[in-house]
Image (cartoon, rainbow, N blue to C red):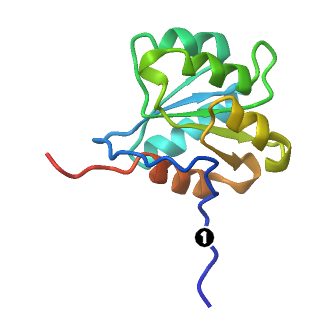
Amino acid sequence: MPAASLTPPLWTTRVFSPVRPPVGVLIVDDDHDLADALQAVLEAEGFEARTADCPACLGLIRFWIPHIVVADIEMPIQNGFALARAMRQVAHMRLVPIIAHTSLAEKDVAREGFASGMDGYCSKSDGPSSLLALLRRVAPVSLAP
């Protein structure tokens, strides 16, 4: 019997264009230890990962455009939904995939997440394998020169 897919479903039906490596991932989370651990995992897998809290990430995207944003939902200054809406107002961020990475259940965040411009969901409790599979789906690597 085949193993179940580890890739969480997307909320969007849009098609994602291949990107040239390294794939840049912006991790936005107020839990700095978790963000740093996730950054280490992503870098070990060949991603270029940066972390920022909510206020700092909006400044960071002025001079660095990630291929993907992984955003927590529950943050004290600005939640992930508000962050996604703010990012979608920045011209070069309109098509960048935004993934909700949260401990909240998908049924509790899907409607507002999709409405705010998020493309998908991954539970923090699923571990890094599910998130890695989702990242590879929304930013497929182009091997063409």
Residue closer to the observer: 65 or 119:
119
Q: Quadrant of the N terminus?
A: bottom right
- Toward the viewer: 82 or 55? 82
Question: Relative to 57, is 23 on the left or the right?
Answer: left
Q: Is residue 129 above or below residue 71?
A: below
**In the image shown, does 13 or 134 lie closer to the viewer?**
13
Mark 1 surroundings: few (<14), some (14-19) or many (≥20) residues within 10 A: few
**Residue that extends furthest to the bottom in the rendered view of this protein:** 1
In which quadrant of the rendered image does the C terminus lie?
A: top left
For badge 1, the amino acid type reads Ser
Quarter holding residue 110: top right
On the picture, is 111 further left or further right than 94? right
Between 54 and 38, the one nearer to me in the picture: 54
Determine whether 98 is above or below 79 in the image: below
Q: Position of residue 106 (x, y in %)?
A: 79, 48
Residue ID at (54%, 50%): 13
Number of numbered discs overlaid on the protein picture = 1
Residue wearing tag 1: 5
Residue 103 on image: x %, y % = 80, 43
- Position of residue 137 measured from the top left corner of the image (x, y, whole percent): 47, 54
Tell me which residue sits at (59%, 58%) in the image.
Answer: 129
Q: Position of residue 73 (x, y in %)?
A: 76, 31
